[in-house]
């Protein structure tokens, strides 16, 4: 686990649904502690790529590794062996994911949402898990909402609980799939603030977003995807102010 | 993360607090519904007439009803009926869950096996199935345990391992499992796909995801029709005479009336017991439904005694204001605009 190994290494990642090739060979690297923003038009395969990283989707071709470990497979004597679901689940523990539609467990309180995985998956003692969960809820500014059910929280609060839930597993990588797209405009800021704090604390993050302000301010790198390929990548300030590719220019002129 | 802290509180000023208190209650003459009153009076009169008539009509023979309702043979039969119901329902629910999961399986063989099961057991009358089970010992005189095409390991005489009660339970359970499978499947499918995804992404196994996330949420959909099925099963047990098994409530009261030549009071006796059990089941269902409404009902931690149990208004996407704890605690409208599925 030296610093030389990138946190995420994608080499020619390809994914097809039937005859529909959604990812056509994505190659990129995310370093430890890096915040990468992934932008692109709808249907360009951003969500699919994120889902490949934690093996919610199975690759059709290419290689993908997280922290030097191949995702979903084990390599022995030059051959790939599919991982047992248990081992795939173990890999996912270290990768947090935040969804556009929050996907909180509606039958559990905010606190229970956060304690569920550490308690059931890691088997940690209840008292310890609850103390950590309360700390995490305080960190996202929701210590006073611990006993509320998701239905009684605003969208922004729900998304912050979802972030706390993902952090509770102490992941080494966080994936955000349009975390603010389902929010009313005045609630976007509170979620972005939490994410900024997380970035500052050194978390490695891949963020699919349409918030170009966030990308400019927080991201270390920006990747523009279209039609299942990486069209342009680089420093956010450079890509946003001086896009080289015509498709990037067309997209940015619409969202900026 | 102080930036998040400071960002939380600023609610729309004034807006929440003033609304409920300033609006004066409406004072208006209530609209009258004269026809409703007329119909209500007619129905009540008819009901009273019927009850008064029934109370003194000799055919009902109420003294006999009173005499037999706690007759030992009847109470034992009532317990037997309850046993039949509970045992067959438990087996049916377990088998139904297995069949439902099989039907949702990606494996085509597993899927078709479940489909064929449903096709047969839903496609034929339960009475016919019970007659078949009664003939089971005739059709299969011995039961052999072993590997297919291999040497038998053990052989039993069918009659020695299973009696008519067991056959009745099997017959009822296997039929009911087909219906339970569809109820469970509908419940599992009603849970948003994002729930499974979120649980999987947290590293939960398939079984943990099912047990902790999917099944508890599907319960809200599964319980009401299952309550129906239990009540229906209670009454279907009266068909076990087809096996033939004759110690259930209905068959037993028929047998008694065959001795006394007085059919009607015994029917009333059986009905009283069926009604009693059904009522108890309905109360149980009410409490179960309440338990699994957690997180979707209107109860909030700070308003435990809330009487309303209405679902949140689905799809009302107006901006939801985040209040300070004090204001949002008082205002029942807050945070209820959102759908329970985080839409
Ligand atoms: N499970 C699936 N089965 C079949 N096709 C799928 C599936 N998931 C995604 N797709 C297809 O893959 C393409 C890319 O989808 P994806 O969700 O990755 O896009 P996206 O870039 O995230 O778009 P958006 O901005 O709208 O979220 C779409 O055309 C979609 O229809
Ligand atoms: Mg997407």
Image: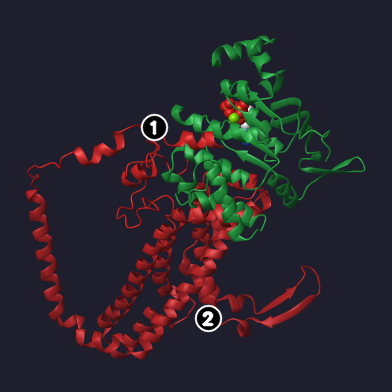
- Front residue of B45/A189: it is A189
Eyeballing the image, is B80 above or below B175?
below
Q: CA distance from mark 1 to mark 2?
A: 63 Å
Which chain does tag 1 point to?
Answer: B
- Of tags 1 and 2, which is closer to the observer? 1
Q: Is residue A195 visible?
A: yes
Badge 1 density bin: few <14, some 14–19, many ≥20, Cα 10 Å: some
Return the x and y of residue B174 as percentages of the image width and height.
54, 66
Ligand 1: quadrant of the figure: top right
Q: What residue sits 63% from the left and 53% below the top?
A: A118
Q: Which residue position is annotated with label 2?
A: B164
Q: Are marks 1 and 2 on the same chain?
A: yes
Q: Earlier in the sequence, mark 1 or mark 2?
A: 2
Apparent colour of chain A: green
Return the x and y of residue B280 as percentages of the image width and height.
35, 71
Badge 2 density bin: few <14, some 14–19, many ≥20, Cα 10 Å: some
- Front residue of B215/A3: it is A3
Which chain does tag 2 point to?
Answer: B
Return the x and y of residue A178 as percentages of the image width and height.
57, 30
The number of numbered discs placed on residues in the rendered structure image is 2
Apparent colour of chain B: red
Q: Which mark is residue B319?
A: 1
Q: Is label 2 in a helix, a strand or a loop?
A: helix
Q: What residue sits 13% from the left and 61% below the top?
A: B43
């Amino acid at each position: 686990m030296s610093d030389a190994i990138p946190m995420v290494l994608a080499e020619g990642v390809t994914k097809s649904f039937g005859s529909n090739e959604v990812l056509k060979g994505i190659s990129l690297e995310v370093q430890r502690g890096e915040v990468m923003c992934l932008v692109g038009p709808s249907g360009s395969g951003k969500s699919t790529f994120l889902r490949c990283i934690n093996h919610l989707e199975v690759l059709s071709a290419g290689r993908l590794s997280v922290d030097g470990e191949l995702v979903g497979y084990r390599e022995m004597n030059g051959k790939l062996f599919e991982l047992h679901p248990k081992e795939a689940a173990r890999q996912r523990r270290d990768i947090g994911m935040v969804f556009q539609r929050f996907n909180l467990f509606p039958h559990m309180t905010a606190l229970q949402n956060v304690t569920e995985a550490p308690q059931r998956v890691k088997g940690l003692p209840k008292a310890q898990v609850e103390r950590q969960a309360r700390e995490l809820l305080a960190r996202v500014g929701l210590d006073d909402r611990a006993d509320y059910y998701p239905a009684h929280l605003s969208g922004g609060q729900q998304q912050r609980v979802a972030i706390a839930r993902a952090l509770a597993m102490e992941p080494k990588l966080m994936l955000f799939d349009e975390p603010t797209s389902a929010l009313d405009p005045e609630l976007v800021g509170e979620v972005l603030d939490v994410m900024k704090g997380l970035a500052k604390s050194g978390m490695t993050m891949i963020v699919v977003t349409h918030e170009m302000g966030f990308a400019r301010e927080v991201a270390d790198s920006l990747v523009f995807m279209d039609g299942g390929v990486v069209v342009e990548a680089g420093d956010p300030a450079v890509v946003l102010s001086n896009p080289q590719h015509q498709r990037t220019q067309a997209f940015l002129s619409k969202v900026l | 993360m102080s930036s998040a802290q400071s960002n939380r509180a600023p609610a729309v000023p004034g807006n929440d607090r003033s609304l409920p208190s300033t609006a004066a209650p409406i004072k208006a003459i209530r609209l009258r519904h004269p026809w409703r009153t007329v119909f209500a009076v007619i129905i009540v009169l008819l009901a009273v007439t019927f009850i008064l008539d029934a109370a003194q009509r000799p055919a009902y023979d109420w003294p006999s009803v009173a005499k037999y309702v706690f007759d030992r043979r009847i109470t034992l039969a009532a317990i037997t009926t309850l046993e039949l119901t509970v045992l067959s329902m438990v087996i049916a629910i377990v088998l139904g869950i297995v069949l439902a999961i099989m039907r949702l399986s990606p494996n085509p063989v597993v899927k078709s096996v479940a489909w064929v099961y449903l096709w047969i057991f839903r496609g034929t009358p339960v009475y016919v199935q019970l007659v078949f089970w009664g003939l089971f010992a005739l059709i299969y005189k011995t039961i052999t345990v072993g590997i297919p095409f291999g040497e038998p390991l053990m052989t039993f005489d069918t009659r020695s391992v299973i009696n008519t009660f067991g056959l009745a339970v099997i017959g009822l359970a296997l039929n009911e499992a087909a219906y339970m499978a569809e109820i469970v499947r509908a419940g599992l499918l009603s849970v948003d796909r994002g729930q499974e995804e979120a649980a999987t992404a947290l590293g939960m196994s398939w079984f943990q995801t099912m047990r902790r996330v999917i099944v508890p949420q599907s319960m809200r959909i599964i319980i009401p029709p299952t309550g129906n099925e239990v009540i229906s099963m209670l009454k279907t047990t009266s068909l076990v005479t087809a096996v033939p098994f004759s110690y259930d409530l209905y068959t037993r009261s028929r047998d008694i009336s065959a001795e006394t030549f007085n059919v009607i009071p015994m029917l009333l006796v059986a009905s009283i017991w069926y009604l009693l059990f059904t009522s108890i089941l309905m109360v149980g269902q009410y409490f179960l439904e309440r338990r699994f409404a957690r997180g979707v009902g209107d109860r909030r931690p700070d308003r435990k005694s809330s009487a309303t149990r209405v679902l949140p208004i689905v799809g009302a996407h107006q901006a939801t204001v985040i209040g300070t704890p004090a204001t949002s605690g008082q205002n029942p409208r807050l945070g209820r605009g959102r759908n329970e599925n985080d839409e």
